[in-house]
Image: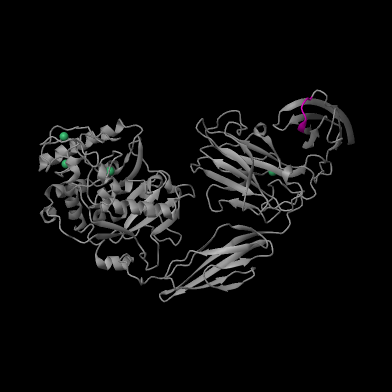
Amino acid sequence: MKFIISLILITFALNLNSFAQQSNKHFCGSDIYHEQLFKENPGLKEQIQIENLTRDLTPYRIQKRESVRVIPVVFHIIHQGGAENISDADIQGVLKRINEDFRKLNPDTSEIRQIFKARTTDMNIEFRLAKIDPYGKCTNGIQRIYSTLTENARDNVKNLKDENTNPIAWDNLKYLNVYVVKSIYNYSGVGVILGYSYYPQIALSDPKKDGIVIRADVTNYNGRTLTHELGHYFGLPHTFQDGCGSDCKTTGDLICDTPPVLEDTYGCDKTKNSCNSDVPDEPDMAENHMDYTNCRVMFTKGQKEVVDYYLNSQYRNNLFKSSNLTATGTDNATNISCKPVANFELKYYAYCSGSPVTFTDKSLGPDNMQYKWYLPGSTNEVFIGKNPSVTYYFGGKYNVKLVVKSASGSDSMVKDNYIFVYPETGEDVTFEEKFEESSFKSNYWFIEPAQSNIQWKKTSAAAFEGKQSFLLNNFANATEREYSFITPPLNLKQVNAPYLLFNYAHARKDDASKDMLRIYVSTDCGVNWSLRDITNHIKLPTAANFVANQFIPQAEDWKYKFVDISNYQGKENVLIKIALYGNGGNNFYLDNLKIYSSVAIKEVSENQNSVHLYPNPANNLLNVDFASDNYDEATISINDINGKTLKQIKVKTNYGNNHIAIDLSDISNNGLYFLVINNSTGIQRKPFNLIRQ
Ligand SMILES: [Ca+2]
Ligand SMILES: [Ca+2]
Ligand SMILES: [Ca+2]
Ligand SMILES: [Zn+2]
């Protein structure tokens, strides 16, 4: 026995070396994660090896006509609101996939070579989503947990807690826990790990580590990773475990109807025969679920014996007991006894005043539940029934409460400020936001996503003017999605050729970062958005170089952004959405957001010493009236919208009113420009248009 164990230790190490050659491979992390586990718990490694070599499979040799073993499953989707927050349909899809594969109902068994056909088997295992959680509450078997641990996940996701501080992991002797994550930490540093699972012994030795961790992008009907990980969960090693050997009972995967395989294999080479030590010498079984090929479609009868052994062991035998199926609601009973859970959803969170708002019930419980809604501010402040449709006539934010009741109990869900109703007419176009106050002047700012570590926030780290600006803390953000804010509704009825103008500063982290800025406009309170402007990752940075650390702009890093929204002239309720599509980039700062008319610029500054420019639009001469509180010298510059200085003059100033006329004849292009006066009292900027017919 000692000799065999030490042989296994040596070949295990060889297997890890072969990973190193697969630099871009997508693979299963179970071997790597077991190695880590055995470092902490060397006794467990020996226990598993002894059990695998001494287990008695004779009771399972004859394929008995057993009934299907039902396994209750819960999926925990760990996400940050990105694509990794996969849909319920994807979960249904992967469930269909594993149920086909474990019942030999998958149509691609037709691709199995003739020599292996007779070895394939129905595993007689069916997976069902749990309908009762460990607390006796109704569930659909799909939990969603917001956590940054979705990136580079490892066993740490199994220790997460939900909003009620309950552990998200459910009792591992009653449920199969599957943790869906965005990416999995790779101890080897080479290749991409798609999923991993520990062997069944973990169920008792370290129950908190039991279960399967899998990437969200392979958790759907087309993904076969979960089938493979379930093989490990039920005690199956890889078919290439420990490489070639001659005695199938003591070498390789210890299963005699799977030919030995030298090392992990990718692609699908059905001519490959990597081991000639087997008697008779058969080709590698590329079709087996426990290899890494992309044509994995079968388990063997020998593998089923091992799975049956572990299913009937103390590690897994409680899962499919009829008492457990009743307790988890997976026995197909018509009347499941569970406490209802109240919940509801809205398709949109923001509405025009006077437009219908329809709530969708998302409660869990029996079909005959009673519903009572509390909808203050709406046309039905109390509503009895499942999916109310109501109307809010006045702008504001409104709370919603739902109470559900069944024979097993009742539950309520309250969502504060859940409904956002825009006022009938937008705000005056003197709208200007400098981000200087702790709150916004208007109540109607909308930030998406509302609950996120990464979202638009005021900051005092940098400002174009004043002390604060608006920051998207996009540094170290790995979730590719839009992070946006929506302006209050704007009334553009009286504005001639409106333009949106703001200052911004941004840097790229490196050549791989590809952040984009998109600007949208809506005239139906956000139901539909039209894309008005897009700035790609090449044009977006204002800093001259890549910034590997947190970007904080210097004065010279700020630029102007100028967006024509003149199509919306005359509209009374216009929303503008400014969205940064985060893709590995860096922080984005924005300041001095305003709307103005490009034809007749109204002076909107509160500054009494304001600068007056005329005529505007200008032709060849621009008159500048400005005030100074000192006998001084001022620098007057003409900048283009990118902040580039086109000309600069120095003038002596008098106390009080000053006037200067600036020759523009050397500026050739029509467009928007800025006059900047810099003197001892500070810097003032004014836009003007240059239009020559
Ligand atoms: Ca074998
Ligand atoms: Ca062979
Ligand atoms: Ca500011
Ligand atoms: Zn594996």
Please give the name of the residue rendered at 50% of the width and 40% of the height, measured from the top-left corner: 476
Queried whether the magenta region covers residue 463, the answer comes back as no
Query: Is 428 situated left or right of 440 in this image?
Result: right
Left or right, residue 182 beside residue 322: right
Q: Nearer the viewer, residue 206 or 198?
A: 198
Q: State which region is magenta.
A: 667-672
Task: Give how far across and how far down residue 629 sits, in percent.
Answer: 85, 38
Among all residues in the image, which is located at the extreme bottom?
407
Locate the N terminus and report the quarter of the image it occupies. top left
Q: How many marks?
A: 0
> Residue at the spot x=47%, y=66% of the render?
363
Place residue 368 in its image quadrant.
Answer: bottom left
Q: Residue 414: tell me if it is visible.
A: yes
On screen, residue 333 versus residue 482, left or right, reads left
Could you say where residue 13 lies in the image, as x and y percent from the top left?
Answer: 23, 35
Q: Main secondary structure of the magenta part?
A: loop
